[in-house]
Amino acid sequence: MLVSLLLFLPAVLAENGRQAWLRYAPLTGSKTGPPALPQSIIALNATQSSPVFTAGQELQNGISGIFNKHLTVSSSHSSASHAWSLVQRHSSRTHSERLLELEVDGFWLNVKGSAVQIVGQSDRGALYGAFEYLSMLARGNFSDVQLVSNPAAPVRWVNQWDNMDGSITRGFGGASIFFDNGVIVSDLTRAAEYARLLSSIRINAVVVNDVNANFTTIQPGNLQGIGRIADVFRPYGVQVALALDFASPMEFGNLTTYDPLDPGVIQFWDDITENIYDIIPDFAGYLVKADSEGTPGPLMYNRTLAQGANVFAKAIEPFGGIVMYRAFVYNLLDESVWTADRAKAAVDFFQPLDGQFLDNVIIQIKYGPIDFQVREPAHPLFANLLNTNVALELQVAQEYLGQQCHLVYLPPLWDTVLNFDLRVNNETSLVKDIITGKRFNRTLGGSAAVVNVGANDTWLGSHLAMSNLYAYGRLAWDWSLQPDDILKDWIQLTFSQDKTVVDTITQMSMASWPAYENYSGNLGEQTLNDILYTHFGPNPQTLDNTPWGQWTRADHTTIGMDRTVSNGTGYSGQYPPEVFEVYESLEKTPDDLVLWFHHVNYTHLLHSGKTVIQHFYDAHYEGAKTAWSFVPMWESLKGRPGIDEERFEDVLFRQNFQAGHSIVWRDAIVNFYHNISGIRDDAGRVGNHPWRIEAESMELDGYELYTVSPFETASNFTAIVTSTNSTTGTASTRISFPSGKYDIGINYFDMYGGNSTYTVSLNNKTVGQWEGNIVDIGKLGHTPSIYLDGHSATRMTFKGVQVKKGDVLKVVGNPSGVEPAPLDYVVLLPQGVID
Ligand code: GCU
């Protein structure tokens, strides 16, 4: 029997996001009454570190939270009838034929009124079944089911990019929950909570350290700590894996080489592997990023990538571990070479090695060949490794997609790749069937997602961003699920079953990726953010004139990468003939990838009937308009069931930020291409802002003009900054617009390194005040900028302000630290105007 202390736990926790979709809140708005609940929970084979034990506790907590009913948990068979029971396959006395259908990690859920049986093929299968059952109850689904559920693939991993110093590469939700100051943290409470979340979506392993691995992670002292992490993950059936630094044999093994064929190096990896398994007997395996972006690898010694991968594979094979070897291998390139193309690199490196990787190696391939862009064609490597295990790499961390400060529900983007038919050997070859191993009869396969949760209560830094993590897990188990169906489950679990809540958040989320694509990078041109600095705000010129190979090749008349065989880089030839034929042809290539495959004039006519440049203009205005619509949509949910004050305010703040930043994006990109092409916008919007008052045109006292770079990230290219870092600046003007009610927007730059304060007044009567602190105090977790640019450009809005013609509008800015209270413009928006 368990102590009853645990029973009320979920119900009393604040709605700060920590419980994510596992809140087990009392049902609201449910039309049916509670189901007939049985008297007790029986968790068989339940030692404390076993997922079956965890399942018993989880059911107990869940039932308590949802129905306020307290069930006992026991591990005895005696009262098995009419009870909740959790059993393992081999100890089960249930002889249902359905059990024979169970595959590794699968479960059987049998609900008949108050009699419920949950049978796992493995311990963690039983836990998955318990979570499935609780998910049904938490969504008010009390129907009888007889359900056998098996995973699409055995590898359902997440990758954390946590560094030993406690930072997270591309992490936007706070510091690492695993590491600090070079060691593993002593308090692993959050790690255990993360394990619970992962387990509920059937993720079975987590790589805890960054792919750009640091050898210190596997040094003896730290390995003990990794062992402690494994201990807190184990009861949830989540295994631990590690990213390796290929040069470790030299860095701490006292060897003079890391050549993978050197006997000393082989011995080194054998020893390390043995040490790891001594401490963590259920260790999942290794993740290797080699010969990529400066990381060491086998190519240094003229060894192949297969030779490199196989050293780890051999070392780990006796223990049952696997090696996830990343396909993200490429060299820096010279843009003046027309045929140079980073997108080709993976196939060039890996295809000749097909069949040479050992059976416990999986090549981990990003969804597209560049780098988690807003749209990419399916990675051609999926069509080129017929005799090698492969897995798909997704990124839940929105590195190039708004860094969790923009709502972007990712499954519709993932869907474009998962359901893409690569037509290998002229047969149906969907990416989702290749990664599971089904298409080419491979036994190993699956997926990994870069997740990067941090210590923030919301995990990812944003409540709404958690739908992406939830959806990833659901998909990794079953790639045939539809993005909006998953979303609806998530909303019900995270907020409530209220129809308005479900419909509204579904509508916002489903519109979010198309909107982001519209204002961040169209027609397959990639995300036009700053690829050299923060990967956050707009800076299209950073894509070109660098050796990184994410080029747009934009000049005054043309744009796009020519990736054809006939006249370009030859990339289209990496696809099987039927796909090649489409992409090779300008006429056949779909509009949404035209600039990925073809170099065309801005005046090129798309299938839509628009020119490329007009499409840019229209899409950017459309995208920003959609982002703006999220604010009233979210506001309409105030006070509705499940929309508590704390989460409501947090999301509202973010949606307001996104609305403002979508204007920054829109204006930057349209101005940039307007400037470079000299082609006017048919609708006359670009450069035309009748409701704006440029800060530089106001009467300034203590403020001076500042030319912003990149130019397109400030309205009229110019901002104002205080003359010194310690003196107040004032900008004032007499309103010449007609009297009426306006939303007053003020565009300023929220830089890292200072919290300037601002006051806006009308005729000396304060309209509002704010502090430019959103990145400094972590209100938004995006990578900060120390400059006035597209990352720091932010809007503050005061709604419904009564303004009279002739009023004196004044903004007073007090600088702070290195932040000189920078201002770009003020806009007075009449009802319905977005600018
Ligand atoms: C991106 C990201 C890097 C990361 C790399 C990778 O380029 O910006 O921080 O290391 O992907 O996937 O290895």
Image: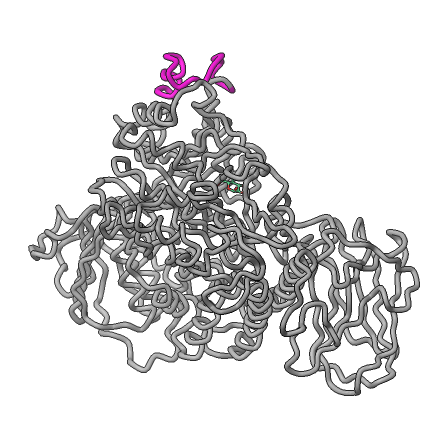
456 to 255, vertically: above or below: below
570 to 62, vertically: above or below: above
Question: Which residue is drawn at the image coordinates 76% and 84% (left, top)?
Answer: 802
Judge whether residue 825 can be spotted in this image.
Answer: yes
What percent of the width, then of the height, locates residue 480?
28, 59
Position of residue 466 in the picture relative to residue 794 (left or right): left
Who is closer to the viewer here, 436 or 60?
436
What percent of the width, then of the height, locates residue 700?
90, 65
Who is closer to the viewer here, 538 or 617?
617
233 to 72, vertically: above or below: above
Who is closer to the viewer here, 44 or 356?
356
Query: In the orientation shown, which residue stands out farthest toward the right?
Result: 701
Q: Quadrant of the C terminus?
A: bottom right
Is residue 710 highlighted in magenta?
no
Determine which quarter of the picture holds residue 349: top left
What percent of the width, then of the height, locates residue 249?
46, 19
Position of residue 386 in the picture relative to residue 781 (left or right): left
Query: In the orientation shown, which residue stands out farthest toward the front?
Result: 566
Question: Which residue is drawn at the image coordinates 46% and 75% (left, top)?
Answer: 504
Part of the protein shown in magenta: 251-272
Question: Which residue is drawn at the image coordinates 23% and 59% (left, top)?
Answer: 41
Question: Which residue is drawn at the image coordinates 48% and 43% (left, top)?
Answer: 568
Who is closer to the viewer here, 758 or 630?
630
Is residue 257 highlighted in magenta?
yes
535 to 614, vertically: above or below: above
User: Is the image coloured rainbow, by chain, by secondary structure, or in one colour?
Assistant: one colour
What percent of the width, then of the height, locates residue 123?
24, 47
Position of residue 686 in the picture relative to residue 640 (left or right): right
Judge whether residue 5 can be spotted in this image.
Answer: no
